[in-house]
Amino acid sequence: MSDTAAAPAKRSRGGRAARRARDANEVVPITPYITRKIPYYEILDDDGLALIEKNAETILAEVGIEFRDDAEALQIWRDAGADVQGQLVKFPRGLCRQLIQASAPREFTQHARNSARSVVIGGKNTVFVPAYGSPFVYDMDKGRRYATIEDFRNFVKLAYSSPSLHHSGGTICEPVDLPVNKRHFDMLYTHMKYSDKAFMGSVTAPERAQDSVDMCKILFADDYIDPDTGKPKTVLISLINANSPMTFDDTMLGAAKVYARNNQACIVTPFILAGAMSPVTVAGTAAQSLAEAMAGMAFIQLVNPGAPVVMGSFASSISMQSGAPTFGTPEPALVLYIMAALARRLGVPFRSGGGFCGAKVPDAQAATEAANTLLPTAMAGVNFALHTAGWMEGGLAMGYEKFVMDTDLAGMMEVMLKGVDLSENGQAMDAIREVGPGNHFLGCAHTQANFKSAFYRSSLADNNSFEQWEVDGSQTQEQRANTLWKKMLAEYQPPELDPVIDQALLDYMQKRKAEFPDSNIS
């Protein structure tokens, strides 16, 4: 073997450190979202998908969907021609589909305050988003504990610092050290202050949805209204969960109306643990999910035709022995593939998937279950992948180490979704001609020009020799992840925010908080 070929094995640790320092000074271009260049993975043919759609229409027409404790919503459905029996709404076959296809956009832009980070949701695009809603957090140093606003800020900073996450998310964790009726202000402000990526609004009460809109009006200032349409730009996307089975409650409906009337996007998601909130079968769960999602999206189109909607699907299974939710299993992946195809047939963006696991610590179970969920997310064509990073314990905990492990996996998915480079450089014929038979490619011009970007480089995996791994401390991936998230927080640099806007946000929060009693009860 030549000296050139042997050189990589002889490089010193000092040389690696020098290269890392050089690479750290390079400006990495922003990739605001992924546009896939590989085919979708389909598991049902047209006949199978049509059967699911037919069953969903039967659910809507014969079983119906409850719209609870919202007289306005029921009147809206009466006026649209639905059969309203108390709080139960039954829909003429095809009505929901017609309403959605008549006005809901196939894709839309969610604007970020930094326009370079705006995301296009729908089409062939994928947006990776942090996990959402956990009351607990976990790290290897302190263990499991209730989340605080400091944890919330930390995760917003980590999401901002993670190139493979395209969105700041929403309630990344629940800051239980703040009063329930006021904490949404601090969460929204944290997204606005510590990140310039797009983010999600509050949905826990209609007035909190309105606060989200009002704070965005301050944040975006003169850029809030689209000069071409005279309408508000879509700067928020928010999660409207169906209370499965086949129910929407007044809280979700109230928030949906606020966002729809302000041209902000709603993700209508049936939240299903199959076997408890839907049938135990894949086809039955898919039909029910489609029916619930279409009812919610059609309602939003009645409130404001053209308001952006995303069809969501959250379907997991439960243990038939304990009743506990399970993650990373085959059946929910099958539901995901079906629902993605149904969303494309309906003509709306799709939300599902992520890095789910039931693990209590960032161990092998956490890694395998997350991978078993995120790979179908990528292959199915999910547009808005909520819960990409951090999800542990069935969603009860947000994990620091798990967060960076998941972002590393998301980076791999991004490379896969970008597909095969068939350019002249990608074909590499010049390299093959230069090297010829019996030689190696390490020193050729093509390799030297492409070595930095040739393959995905994990931020966590250890691919050194066993001896070098021992010298470096014999660390597990969890330990390396612990070091990484601390390093990311230590090196975090906040995006600039106009001091006038910052003060206006603080003034709004102070004024609104003063209207509530000092109580931890909403």
Image (tube, grey):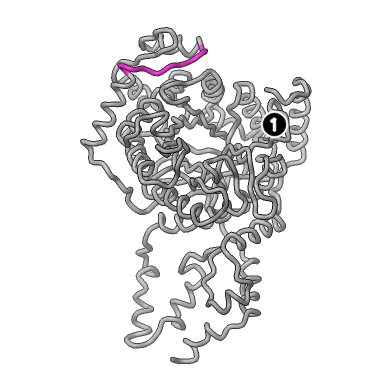
Question: Where residue 435 sits: x, y (%)?
Answer: 37, 84
Q: How many marks?
A: 1
Q: Is residue 316 visible?
A: no
Q: Is 282 or 319 nearer to us in this picture?
A: 319
Q: Is residue 290 visible?
A: yes
Residue at 68 percent across and 57 percent down: it is: 486
Relative to 503, is 55 on the left or the right? left
Q: Quadrant of the C terminus?
A: top right
Residue at 75 percent across and 24 percent down: it is: 519
Residues drawn in magenta: 61-70
Residue 492 on the magenta segment: no
Q: For mark 1, what is the residue?
A: 183
Relative to 65, is 176 on the left or the right? right
Question: Where residue 125 sits: x, y (%)?
Answer: 43, 46
Question: Where residue 434 sits: x, y (%)?
Answer: 37, 83
Give the image quarter of residue 332.
Answer: top left
